[in-house]
Amino acid sequence: MIYKEYKGLNLPEIEKDVLQFWEQNVIFQQSIDSRPDDKSFVFYEGPPSANGLPGIHHVVGRTIKDIFCRYKTLQGFRVERKGGWDTHGLPVELKVEQELGITKEDIGTKISIEEYNVKCRETVMQFKSQWDDLTKIMGFWLDLEHPYMTFENGYIESVWYIISEIYKKNLMYKGYTIQPYSPAAGTGLSTHELNQPGSYRDVTDTTIVACFEVESCCIDKLNVAFNTKLENAHFLAWTTTPWTLPSNTALTVGAKIEYALVASFNPYTKARQNFILAKELISKWFKPEQEVQSIEELAVDEKTFNYFVVGTALGSALKGIMYHQLLPFEANSADKIEGKSFQVITGDFVTTTDGTGIVHTAPSFGVDDRKVAKENGIGSLTMVDLEGKFIQGMGFLSGRYVKDYRDEKDYKSPDVDIAIELKTKGLAFNVQKYVHSYPHCWRTDKPVIYYPMDSWFIRTTSVKDQLIANNKKINWKPESTGTGRFGQWLENIQDWNLTRSRFWGIPLPIWKSKNNEELCCIGGQQDLLTHIGNANASGLLSAEEVVENEKFKADFSAGKGDLHKPFIDRVTLVQNGQVLKREEDVIDVWFDSGSMPYAQWNYPFSNQDKFKQAYPADFIAEGVDQTRGWFYTLHTISTILYDQPAYKNVVSNGLVLDKNGEKMSKRKGNVINPFDAIPKYGADAIRWYIISNSAPWENLKFDINGVDEVKRKLFGTLYNTYSFFTLYANIDQFVLDEMNVTPIRERTELDRWIISKLNTLKKEVQEALENYEPTDAARAIDTFVDRNLSNWYVRLCRRRFWKNDVSADKRAAYETLYECLMTVAQLMSPIAPFFGEWLYQTLSNPLRENAVKNNTPLRHISVHLTTWAPIEEEYIDLNLERRVELAQDVSSMILSLRKKEQIKVRQPLQKAMIPVLNEQEKMLYQSIEDIVKAEVNVKEFEYVDENSGLFVKSAKANFKLLGKKLGKDMAAIAKKIAEFDQNQINQVEREGKINIEEGGVNYELVKAEIEISTSDMPGFLVVSENGITLALDISMTEDLLDEGVARELINKVQNYRKDQNFNVTDRIKINYAPESNMDRVIKKFGSFISTEVLANEIEPSASMQKPLDVELNEINTKIEISKL
RNA sequence: AGUCUCAUAGCUCAGUUGGUUAGAGCGCUACACUGAUAAUGUAGAGGUCCGCAGUUCAAAUCUGCGUGGGACUACCA
């Protein structure tokens, strides 16, 4: 036996064998080494974090990566694929805290930073082996032996180098920003944590509209603005966080918003007051029916608070007006404020959608507040400490927690007391409960506040134009992510907050003197050691500092140095006669991963050539959630360093949801575990399902039934085709001779057709993969395998394989089918690397020896080492493809007519009739006649001439052409054309034009503007579809009926042979019960039957041993079949 | 809240530059084929192309406004 025959398709089994083969023969390495050094295709692996288990969504991303790397390898590129691990950051730290049952405050007290970081280092690689397993079993080729690790000194120092370069460009500064902060946990929170599910919750807060009284010194300015003469007035400002009111230092208005000065009454004290608020929002706080037309009409009683609009002014006119501090205490007096305070400023974020159009501004507790205050030189007050309580010197608020952070039994919100205080003083206009969504700390369940903190920033805003320009050079898949989500993000870019007050991360390499005058940014390990040497030699350090420095150096000499905290914090440097201490923070992990193009090679300290070869990347792929993550950091760092994009092509894939479109989560129990699914269904089936189901950037609704379908449809069909081939190839001992194949031109039309289709397929797949559209590639292969190869080519060719001898025609059939299978194996191998490999090997192993000897394309032991088969344009014959398509359509139409009349295909019919308009059309049908006749069991085709009068034509407007010409008469004329009688149609055909009148206009229509088709043949069984019309003659003759019986008999005998497990070569003898009808059938078709069923004799017999009852159409009789 | 994205048959998806019977596969029903047989074919049922408005002779397709799902960014008085 030349080709292995299998009991059935077992993908997981195949994959196990292939994996073993790959390992034993180091195929992955070979696939890289065999490609030239100077023709590289650069791929970057976005480092995953191994502190969690990989899920099915990782299979999606990694399948996409693998496809293009494998494809480019086949194209002859050298595709190195260095793996990598993201090892730092908050997720790791939080996990460790959880495991140890500690909080941030305990780090450095209950547990040393050193111990803590050791624990982080262990935890981060906790699931590495599972990740490696997944990578392996899913068939993702990645260099797992030499991955980059972001916690290694070599990696860290590269990152330092990058930071120092950015620093040198003067793009780094230390700033003070408002960040989410959890007083209960005593820690700042990353946006990552804030976006944990369930962080945002609806809470009910006390809201206050407070009255800020205009300073008497500014009342004149106010009167000018509103063109009035009042003695006092109050600004109205709304807040949902009354506890920030004591920290208020400004009121912000919109410069272009119109404000009104409204004379009315304080609802709580009933005193006459004048209020300023956005004109548009008057109706929100006052009832329109209570508006009066003059100030004299104002009157108050218990129920009515009427009001009068004194005047209006633009916000810009209010700028600079001072007001009384709302809640003055000892600790928040004006002299405690650095900068201006208690005045009206303008800001563009002010809206009139809610509140009063005047924004209470507390720069310490709001991002916008901080920004607008800074722009206007307004100082800040921070009346709440890091524990979330008011500082001392705040009167009745002193020492009170702004929210219930301690679960106190009798906790009373200061918000309420502030409201009461303001009400009694006549400084509250409105107090009410308000429900809104507010972020909570996911660990303590307590509300977060926004709090000012120190951080280092990268001034990304100053490279905005380059970032945008470089983004335009990137090929985004899909494009909208690049122009939309990413483009928009760049348009609104903010400075990058680089530092985190945490422990497990790359330390910020900046040392600073106590007086802030001296700053030093270290750019590498050696740089640091040199600085240490200089510092020690300076004589400015204490003995203790020198000892620590020496110890640090000694560790490096001994090869056990560590650039992490806490060791790095013990290093003291000296610059210009001043002692420098390290800025204690670590950097954002996203900076780690964005540095990988350089740091993975320890650039510039080593591998300079390697780096130059591998930068920028040709291709990267990650989830769309990385748009503002890795895609951004790669882009930004690359732009700052070299002013070019870090990657040329990027595929951002969508999410993986469950089959109902819901997010997968352990809680819902709808997760698909790849470690269960892959061994059960096979990685290839899953990979193919993922890719063929929808474009990578669409969300994937993962339905495991779909995987099953893919397995049946594609792999099952291919496997069946393979089995078919081997069944006969083994009998005939067929092995392809690469040096001597039948020239394509000498093969049958059907062979040339499938070869044409095959080359068209190659073209489609190649184009799709070049465009990073793997879905189109997979679907094209699906269609080819199912529709063309299996259901047309093989089905129609079966007879060629049954012949006994090995004729030239049979050989051509083998060669053709073989080529199709082998090409498909290669085309599919990037997506289905296992099955592609299996198919390639099992078909080519028998000829390997010769191929190696002759150095032909099939000399490679693995499909992944082969070279992408070139598209052979000369074999693409689109006319032939169209002809066969017509044959398929015609066959399908005849079959559907048969179906309608309940006539089995085994029953021959005399003729089909096809109306043809001209000789050309007739020739077209004639060219497919034989195929169709065999396919639908019809004896002859009759072509009916246009002028025979046998068929009816119909006309239809050509909308595309006529639309432009006729304009709004289109509809009416289309109707008239559809109603053309035969004479009118004939006129169009004869004269090439016809005149129609519509709405008084006479239009001349030419032939091209009218589509004429045959639609009916009265008196016959007719079907008309897609411009094809045909009729079937279903009248029966005795001959036809007898042949039907003969074919029926053949069918029964074949089934019997199958049931009895006869070999396909066994000869048989048939006896039948003597009966006149049977005699006649056998007389007419005996030899036909004999050939078909390999019967040596067919005889009537009155005495059968084991007769079978058979029903042959109308004939019920008995037969007996015996092996000879 | 902003930005992006998606919405076509029960399900998963196609649908070219707007052009007149809106397609495929799965599933369902029925029938057939079978020297590939744990495969296959044919047919049938199944559509408010998310809604509304507009542009146009003509809209699943273009524009605007909504609704719903999802992602990201943020949380703002």
Image: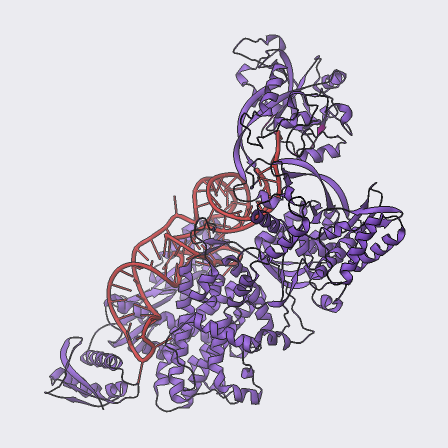
Chain colours: A purple, B red
Q: Does the rendering let one see residue A1089?
A: yes
**Is residue A1016 rendered to the left or right of residue A612?**
left
Task: Give the quarter of the figure containing the N terminus of chain A.
Answer: bottom left
Task: Give the quarter of the figure containing the C terminus of chain A.
Answer: bottom left
Towards the viewer: A184 or A968: A184
Confirm whether the magenta stretch covers residue A750. no
Q: Look at the picture and state if A259 lies above or below A201.
A: above
Towards the viewer: A353 or A691: A691
Query: Which quadrant of the view contains residue A729?
Result: bottom left
For the stretch drawn in magenta, the main secondary structure is loop
**Is residue A132 rendered to the left or right of residue A1025?**
right
Residue A810 percent across, percent down from the top left? 40, 87
Q: Does the rendering let one see residue A759?
A: no
Query: Which quadrant of the view contains residue B24?
Result: bottom left
Query: Which residue appears at 70% of the width and 39% of the height?
Result: A453
Q: Look at the picture and state if A406 lies above or below A512.
A: above
Residue A351 percent across, percent down from the top left? 62, 31
Query: Which residue appears at 86% of the width and 52% of the height?
Result: A535
Residue A424 percent across, percent down from the top left? 61, 14
Towards the viewer: A507 or B59: A507
Confirm whether the magenta stretch covers residue A351. yes
**Is residue A414 rendered to the left or right of residue A802?**
right
Query: Which residue appears at 57% of the width and 70% of the height?
Result: A71
Query: Which quadrant of the view contains residue A517?
Result: top right
Towards the viewer: A93 or A715: A93
Q: Which stretch is magenta?
A: A345-357
| Tally of numbered tags | 0
Residue A967 percent across, percent down from the top left? 49, 50
